[in-house]
Amino acid sequence: MRQLLEYQANRIEAVFAHHKIPAYVTGGTVTPRLIRYNVTPALGTRIASITGLAEELAAALGAPTVRVARQGAVIAVEVPRDDPRSVRLLPLLQGLHNVPPITAVLGIADDGVPLLIRIPSPDVAHILVAGTTGSGKTMLLRAMVISLAAFNGTETLRFVLIDPKGSAFRGLEGLPHLTRPIIADPAEAVEALGSLVRLMEGRSRQVNKDTRGDGHSLSTCSLSTCILVIDELVDLMMTAGDGVESNLQRLVQRGREAGIHVVAATQKPTAAVIGSLVKANFPVRLVGKVTSPEDARVATGWPGSGAERLAGRGDFLAVAEGRLYRFQAAFIAPEEVADLARERRWNVAPKAVPAPGGNGSNGGHAVLLPAPTISPDPVEVTKERLLRAGWKPDWSYRRACRAVGEEEGGAGFWLVKQAVDGLRNGATATATGAEMPQGGTSGGNGRFSTSSSGNDWVEAFLEYL
């Protein structure tokens, strides 16, 4: 690898010397999919003279494509590796700690650290994912949904997933964070968007009603965050009609204050296709490989972003706050989703709850309900774990904690204590023929509660190894 780096650095400098450009390679970074060389030009050098040499550099290095872009005071020359490696989501999640609430893991940035995005941040609110077929849009959406679910409980986070293709979110049907089954029918998608609009209006009225007497509005943080994820937005708008665009416009304009956020994917996010108001309200763009420089400018909103030179298959640009980041999206295989579901005990299938009135104004479709309607009782779950571990009435609390992998005095100790008390009461009641009392109480176990520090939309954790 050392010899390859020296060879390519010398070839890059040779191309600059041939075109009489005073610029030199001063460092770089090796990432799973590419090698990034930092080029420092002499003072006064025209940047366009360097960025316009992408094809010459690719030919000199024998690479299929090379992306050249300015990043601060240096010029980044990014060369795809001959032995690209995928970024696995599960190992990435296991190495992250103290992740802020409602923060999605995107992948590995070009500087080798994990790239995360905190969706409720005012600089984010809604996210638009763009790229051609095969760029990795669906893979990125799945990684975002799974990472959000892994770090946030059902009491704080809910999902509405719309999948016109019927295959993008396969394997996530049993996710307990779902407010309703995954939607593939266009008519049901329109109804779901209308339901979200009504939820947004109801929350806005509640916040206005709960305003304190001193004029300070109560926070909406006590309400669960609801994230609408749409795969193939343009296809949905073409098949479902104007109902999608009108409801989506209202959600992206007013949804953030009500705790409702939109993450949508499309191949070409032009204003003519998705509407100017919808496009203007997606502050963050995640752009994969596109077919032409014009499509790159439309997708990123930046001239000369180089999105047409991305490698595809998870190679993305993140555009936010007037800055641009390149990253490799994390990948998770279907069998890994199943393993994570077993580890997190995501074994509760989502239920569609009929709207009040049957054939009323909602047509009998499902409506959004608070999380406790489909959340399992954590005490009852702990009881089942104890029984599977061979629990006996003479076990102490300490031994019961060890049996289920909890620490005595830790966050889950009170759950184990209540579960043991409930099982003991049940055993006593069974022995005496008395009616078994309720041994558990509902509520979260605090396992997913984290604290947020800082307001930046991106936070990097853990040097990539």
Image (cartoon, rainbow, N blue to C red):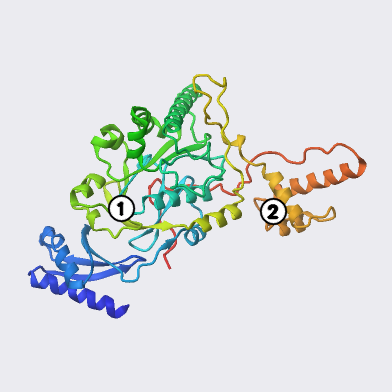
Residue at horizontal 77%, vertical 54%? 397
Which amino acid is tagged 2? Gly
Which quarter of the figure has residue 52?
A: bottom left
Q: Earlier in the sequence, mark 2 or mark 1?
A: 1
| Quadrant placement of the C terminus | bottom left
- Amino acid residing under circle 1: Gly
Q: Residue furthest right?
A: 432
Q: Quadrant of residue 284?
A: top left
Q: Position of residue 242 (x, y in %)?
A: 33, 28
Q: Which mark is residue 59?
A: none
Name the residue at 78% across, 38% down.
438
Q: Position of residue 422 (x, y in %)?
A: 79, 44
Residue 145 placed where, x, y %?
Answer: 46, 47
Mark-to-mark CA distance, 2 and 1: 47 Å
SS of the residue under disc 1: loop
Q: Residues within 10 Å of mark 2 (few under 14, many from 20)?
A: few
Q: Nearer the viewer, mark 2 or mark 1?
A: 1
Quarter of the picture holding the N terminus: bottom left
Mark 1: few/some/many CA within 10 Å (<14, 14-19, 20+)? many
**Label 1: which residue?**
288
Residue 189 lies left or right of residue 346; in this view the side is left
Question: Is residue 273 found left or right of 21 in the rendered image?
Answer: right
Residue receiving disc 2: 409
Tag 2 secondary structure: loop
Position of residue 253 relative to residue 155, above or below, is above
Work out whether residue 50 or residue 365 is closer to the camera in this orientation and state it. 365
Pointer 2 and pointer 1: residues touching (CB < 8 Å)? no
